[in-house]
Amino acid sequence: MSEKTRYSDEELQEFKELILEKLEKAQRDYELLKADVTNAEGNDIADTSPTFKVLEEGASTLGKEEAGRLAQRQMKFIQHLQAALVRIENKTYGICRETGELIPKERLRAVPHATLGIEQKQQKKK
């Protein structure tokens, strides 16, 4: 029996459903982070009332900066998930970009946008 070179359409559909779920959640999280940064939901007086609490202002600024970084990271995750959907459509999903071998299903279930097998990923970190 020859070794599989790609996942079957049924397997790809399973991964597509997993990715779509993660994508929906990631987009919701991104919108919440973006709203926190832009204060889109803010109808209060927090940004207009005079305050003498410098530490609170500093903490608020740091909180917005952190939310901004998290939003950027979330957008990058969304882009990776969208790229994985394109690979599913092209039937190249789950193939290691360095070895050309199939990435194990367990890895893809944990990291559905993975483009490298575990060994290749660990080598990149070194």
Image: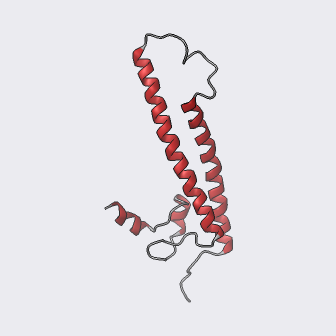
Q: Residue at x 58, y 62 (%)?
A: 84
Nearer to me, 14 or 44: 44
**In the displayed structure, does residue 54 sit left or right of residue 20?**
left
Q: Is residue 66 above or below residue 10?
A: above
**In the rendered picture of this protein, how many numbered marks are placed on residues?**
0
Residue that extends furthest to the bottom in the rendered view of this protein: 1
Query: Residue at left 58%, top 69%?
Result: 93
Query: Residue 90 in the image: x percent, y percent?
Result: 63, 71
Query: Which corner quadrant of the image does residue 38 belong to?
Result: top right
Q: Is residue 53 above or below residue 41?
A: above
Q: Seen in the image, is 43 located left or right of residue 55?
A: right
Residue positioned 40% across, 15% down in the render: 54
Location of residue 6 (image quadrant): bottom right
For the N terminus, the image quarter is bottom right
Residue drawn 56% across the image and 61% down it = 109
Q: Residue 87, position in %: x, y?
A: 60, 67
Q: Is residue 18 left or right of residue 68?
A: right
Where does the C terminus fall, quadrant-wise? Answer: bottom left
The percent coordinates of residue 22 (x first, y second) are: 61, 52
